[in-house]
Amino acid sequence: MTHYVRGHNKSIARFRCALLDAAGGRGGEGGIQPVTTPAQRLKTALEAPGLHLMPCCFDALSARLIEQAGFRVSLMSGFAVSATRLGMPDTGLISFAEMLDQLRNVCQAAPGLLVIGDGDTGYGNAMNVQRTVRDYARAGAAAVLIEDQVSPKRCGHTKGKQVVGRAEARMKIRAAVDAARSGSDDILILARTDARAVHGFDAALERCQDFVEEGADIIFMEAPHDAAEMAAFCAGIDRPAMANMVRGGQTPILPPHELEALGFKLAAYPLTLMSAAIDAMRTALAAVADGREGHVAQADFEALKTLVGFPDYYEREQAYRAAE
């Protein structure tokens, strides 16, 4: 049976309760138990049947909309953050500090959403990778993506990519896993290779298998060229696999039921929301320029105030109002 993992707010509530029950987070002989971490909740979700559809977020508002639409998981896209925060391409120009700041905002705005933070190359060597992993965990991410591109990296579906050597790629993932498993920080590792574009499919699959051996929790081969390669990738690894659905990219856009049949557990849509927002803003700008602002489809003011939290703010403000 096909299971696409999204729904409405009631579904989110039921999902949270189910995860708490499965992890011993409420009830039972021991009564109320400590709440599980985002990483533990994501791990539980990935062990359950179904493909998780992931519209990618890029700021606090997009994350909140994704959560309210009933999606369980989202990846904070480095491409989209670089575009919306800097107005610059995804070519390694955005910094670790800027990505970490954006991740904190995303996690705080949508606390029920399981967020995968794009950690790019880890922003340096293995020691930098470990800092990235730990700080992303402390920001609230359920998982962090670490890739094997040479720095400065670039979007996986654009030209000019290069990858580090296989041994260095393996050591980076080992460092990431060690950081995730040590101390009090808890976060899953999503290991990505871009070797398909540089060394071919077989070499990319070997790297994915290296990452499995090092203990990565989720595996992502960027830009397989067809459904046969996508199926071989999923069959060749003993871990949850992620697909990246980029319109105009190197990988075919497949419907969810086909992705699930191939063996994927996660399907990311990194540019869908940003691209839709760009088109909507251009339409609105043209309408304003023509004196037709009133004909633009847009959220009403009350809905907008509710979305960003005015009612909750007023309620809390009243609770702390000093007596006259």
Image (tube, grey):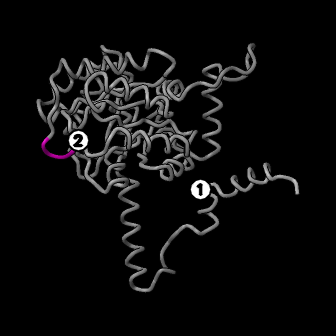
* Residue marked by disc 2: 156
Q: Secondary structure at mark 1?
A: helix
Q: Looking at the image, is mark 1 or mark 2 earlier in the sequence? A: 2
Q: Which residue is mark 1?
A: 308
Q: What is the spatial separation of the Cα atoms under label 1 and label 2, in whole angstroms?
A: 33 Å
What secondary structure is the magenta-colored segment mainly? loop
Q: How many numbered circles are shown?
A: 2
Viewed as shown, does residue 70 lie left or right of 319?
Answer: left
User: Disc 2 marks which amino acid?
Assistant: Gly
Residue at the right extreme, as displayed: 324
Q: Residue at left 74%, top 53%?
A: 317
User: Is 1 above or below relative to 8?
Assistant: above
User: Residue 72 at x, y = what percent?
Assistant: 52, 39
Residue 131 location, x and y as percent?
37, 26
Judge the density around disc 2: few (<14), some (14-19), many (≥20) Cα neighbours within 10 Å.
Answer: many
Residue at (44% x, 16% y) in the render: 181
| Stretch of the chain drawn in magenta | 156-160
Quarter containing the C terminus: bottom right
Which mark is on residue 154? none
- Indicate the amino acid at tag 1: Val
